[in-house]
Amino acid sequence: ASAPVFAEPVPVESLLGDTAHAVAVLEAEADLDGARHELERDRDQQGWQLTGAAGDGIIKNIVSANQAISYPGAQGQLGFSYPLLDSSEQKQRAVDSASGKVEEKQARVDDARRRAPLELESDYARYWGAQEGMMVIDAYLATEPEVVSRLQLRQQKKLMLQSRLTELLAGYEAAHANQAQLQRVLDQTRSRLERLVGHPLTNLQASAVSLPEMQGIVAEDVFDKYPDIAELRAKADALKAQLDDSSWYGMDASFNVLGAVNTDQRDHQTGGTGFVGLNFSAPLSLLSVRREERERLQSELQGVRLQQRQRSEELIADAHAALDRLAEATADMSLAAHKTSSAAEALRERQLRSNV
């Protein structure tokens, strides 16, 4: 693997404005758009329903106790039906469920829009770190031809043991392995950055990023806006609305307005029928069915609330653990800076001895 040829540095600020075209954001927005259309569809199915039928066959009308008239005829009917009781609540429960899905998808969209810039900054910093490491390794490997020849000459003059020469040469082999590893990191992070900004980033050169000051206090009320919590809250609200709209569960009813036309195909006489009425239907165990359904909704609602509570506690614990890892990383950075200073001093001393 060879080090890429970089162009002018691209600051992270110039890429943050393109995160609206990230694949994850576009997918979340597409899911939200689909959920909104589903909600509008369920809302449009509420209210009056148009009914109709048509047929052709034999019609038999009773004239008296011993007389009936049969004739071939065509029949068509058209009417309107308005759902009542549980029939109306069923449609409202569908709207409640669709509304909950819209809220869940909206939470996912908000999360994707907030997460994309954070992921971009993280991948950008990782890319910069690999880029800096690649520069160090390239500078180290550039000395390989001259240094290896000198070491071999020292070993030939019996100024160095063969084991020491092998040990030093192993350092260059490790550098080649690290170079390939860093190249893989560069390719992976650049690919993720391209997905986050929605366009290719060829010959990307990153620049150093200043980390903002991190507050050590975690406000627990902030987690109410976390997407997992927002989704569970929306699901709980949808279940609560469905529970409220199940008072007439099991008892279906509708108000019907119907008109029918009959035509005698033999002598072409036409007749008609008009009908206005109420239709009811209910299972024999209506009270048991209604109770079981409401208890099912209550159990599911209780389970969602428990999940919401558990997830909130997990998020708080994860946030405190993240702050602890940040403090640990800060201490590691201080140690690394101390080691770098020590190595620089050792290099200066060796340079002086080499000059002597």
Image (cartoon, rainbow, N blue to C red):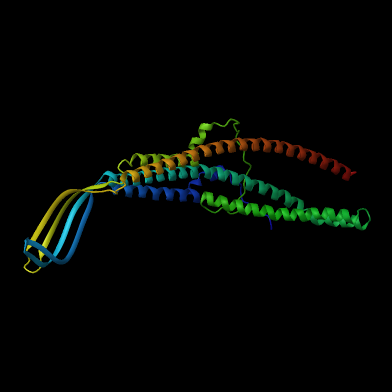
Residue 74 drawn above or below residue 242? below
Q: Quadrant of the N terminus?
A: bottom right
Horizontally, residue 339 falls left or right of residue 156, namely: left
In x, y percent, where is residue 92? 32, 44
Task: Compare residues 14 and 87 and report the one nearer the observer.
Answer: 87
For this view, does 319 lie left or right of residue 356? Answer: left
From what the image shows, is residue 260 above or below residue 9?
below
Q: Residue at horizontal 6%, vertical 61%?
A: 65
Frontmost residue, 12 versus 255: 255
User: How far from the left and from the top, in percent, is residue 123?
Assistant: 60, 47
Residue placed at 52% from the left, 53% from the top?
199
Q: Residue lying at the far right in this picture: please name it.
A: 158
Rendered position, 219 above or below 275? above
Return the residue nearer the eye: 32 or 78: 78
Residue 22 visible to the viewer: no
> Which quadrant of the rendered structure holds the C terminus?
top right
Residue 94 lies left or right of residue 62; in this view the side is right
Measured from the top left, where is residue 316 in percent x and y? 56, 35
List x then y, in percent, for residue 125: 62, 44
Residue drawn 94% across the image and 55% down it: 158
Q: Is residue 245 left or right of residue 336?
A: left
Numbered marks: total: 0
Residue 187 visible, this angle: yes
